């Protein structure tokens, strides 16, 4: 091989690269991008690994009566004495003296119908009594005169100054006057009866409260036509409805399969939906001796042992039937949580409170069991804590709640 042939085999460093190959610096950029992507993926993976999925439960206020609860039922507050008031008479409502919420006393007038016609009849009946009494006085005068004539006639007849027929006529007049007195007295009695009828008619235009109570509803206004015992157009029946608030009870439906666990006098605890933080003591008053076929329940009536002025008719209520009465020191709620939310680490009882998606280790102490919960100190009602915390859940660690 000649030297000319060897010179052809030399590599020209300045010649452009062929075959579509990229410069080395492009490979360096690609490698840098791959490294950054792997680092980002590693950071994301580490963050995901640091936020274990956990279940959360809420710390609640629990009442010790849960330990004595045999069964629960729901129902409504109802008054045992309730009346829709109307008048027996028919007419236009002239005066109404109560509003919703007004307290009334037994026999207190609360409304009045127009009564000019019946009052006029009462005045007429009173006048008839006066006429009858005047007639009686006239009859008594006639009787005295007839008696005097008979006395004189008897003396004259004894002296033969008058005939027996004259004497007999005087005696007949006396008998007639005596009989007239009886009729006049009966007329007075009839007039007095008529006056009583008129007084009743006037009284029937008044609407009185039959018992002490509170006005629940007002169904008519002044000027309305009141027509009891009918549904005439543009007329009202009941004017107001009142209830005796001292007779409020809870009517609760109890499944017939559980009715054997209920007995009269059994202690209960009443919770009203309108007053969720209040528990009122009650007891079973009676059970209605029939079963509702549609619901397979028995109506149980529970009376209030403790009363609250805020309790109103038709409030919804829940009744817990207890095995024994709640002691005075057990009526206040305590902070409680599910036992599975508490773990022991390094001799300390801890609960992990969740705040801003991070776990906070809270040292707690436990007390008595309350149903399925346990009394706890160191937490507050409403706190959300980790349920069954694993070793991955630590103070300050991120957590992801999977069950709200």
Image (cartoon, helix red, strand yellow):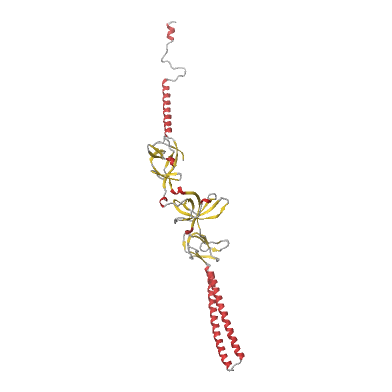
Q: Is residue 63 visible?
A: no
Q: Nearer the viewer, residue 9 or 106?
A: 106
| Image location (x, y in percent) of residue 137 | 53, 82
| Image location (x, y in percent) of residue 231 | 58, 61
- The furthest residue to the right: 165
Q: Nearer the viewer, residue 9 or 215?
A: 215
| In the rendered image, the vertical position of residue 49 relative to residue 15, given as above or below | below
- The furthest residue to the top: 2
Say which quarter of the image contains residue 26. Answer: top left
| Image location (x, y in percent) of residue 327 | 42, 52
Q: Is residue 34 visible?
A: yes
Say which quarter of the image contains residue 228. Answer: bottom right
Say which quarter of the image contains residue 151. Answer: bottom right
Q: Is residue 5 left or right of residue 168?
A: left
Indicate the quadrant containing the N terminus: top left, top right, bottom left or bottom right.
top left
| Image location (x, y in percent) of residue 222 | 51, 63
Q: Residue at point 57% right, 83% down?
A: 178
| In the rendered image, the vertical position of residue 116 relative to residue 157, given as above or below | above
């Amino acid at each position: 091989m000649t030297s000319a042939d060897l010179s052809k085999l030399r590599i020209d460093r300045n010649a452009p690269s062929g075959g579509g190959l990229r410069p080395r610096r492009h490979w360096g950029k690609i490698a840098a991008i791959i490294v950054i992507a792997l680092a980002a993926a590693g950071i994301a993976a580490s963050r995901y690994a640091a936020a274990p999925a956990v279940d959360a439960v809420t710390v609640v206020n629990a009442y010790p009566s849960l330990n004595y609860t045999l069964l629960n039922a729901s129902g409504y507050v109802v008054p045992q004495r309730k009346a829709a008031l109307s008048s027996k008479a028919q007419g236009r409502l002239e005066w109404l003296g109560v509003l919703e919420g007004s307290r009334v006393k037994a026999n207190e007038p609360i409304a009045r119908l127009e009564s000019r016609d019946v009052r006029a009849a009462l005045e007429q009946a009173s006048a008839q009594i006066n006429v009858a009494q005047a007639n009686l006085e006239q009859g008594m005068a006639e009787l005295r005169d007839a008696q005097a004539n008979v006395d004189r006639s008897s003396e004259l007849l004894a002296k033969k100054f008058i005939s027996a027929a004259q004497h007999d006529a005087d005696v007949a007049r006396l008998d007639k006057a005596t009989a007239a007195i009886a009729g006049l007295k009966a007329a007075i009695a009839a007039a007095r009866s008529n006056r009583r009828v008129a007084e009743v008619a006037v009284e029937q235009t008044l609407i009185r409260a039959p018992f002490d109570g509170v006005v629940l509803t007002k169904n008519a206004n002044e000027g309305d036509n009141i027509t009891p015992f009918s549904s005439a157009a543009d007329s009202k029946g009941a004017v107001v409805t009142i209830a005796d608030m001292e007779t409020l009870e809870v009517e609760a439906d109890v499944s017939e399969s559980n009715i054997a666990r209920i007995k009269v006098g059994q202690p209960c605890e009443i919770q009203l939906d309108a007053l969720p933080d209040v528990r009122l003591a009650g007891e079973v008053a009676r059970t209605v001796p029939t079963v509702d076929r549609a619901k397979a329940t028995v109506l149980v009536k529970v009376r209030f042992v403790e009363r609250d002025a805020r309790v109103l008719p038709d409030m919804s209520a829940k009744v817990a039937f207890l095995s024994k009465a709640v002691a005075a020191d057990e009526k206040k709620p305590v902070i409680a949580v599910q036992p599975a939310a508490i773990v022991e680490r390094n001799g300390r009882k801890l609960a992990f409170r969740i705040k801003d998606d991070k776990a906070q280790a809270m040292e707690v102490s436990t007390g008595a069991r309350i149903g399925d919960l346990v009394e706890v100190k160191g937490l507050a009602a409403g706190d959300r804590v980790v349920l069954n915390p694993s070793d991955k859940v630590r103070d300050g660690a991120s957590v992801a709640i999977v069950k709200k």
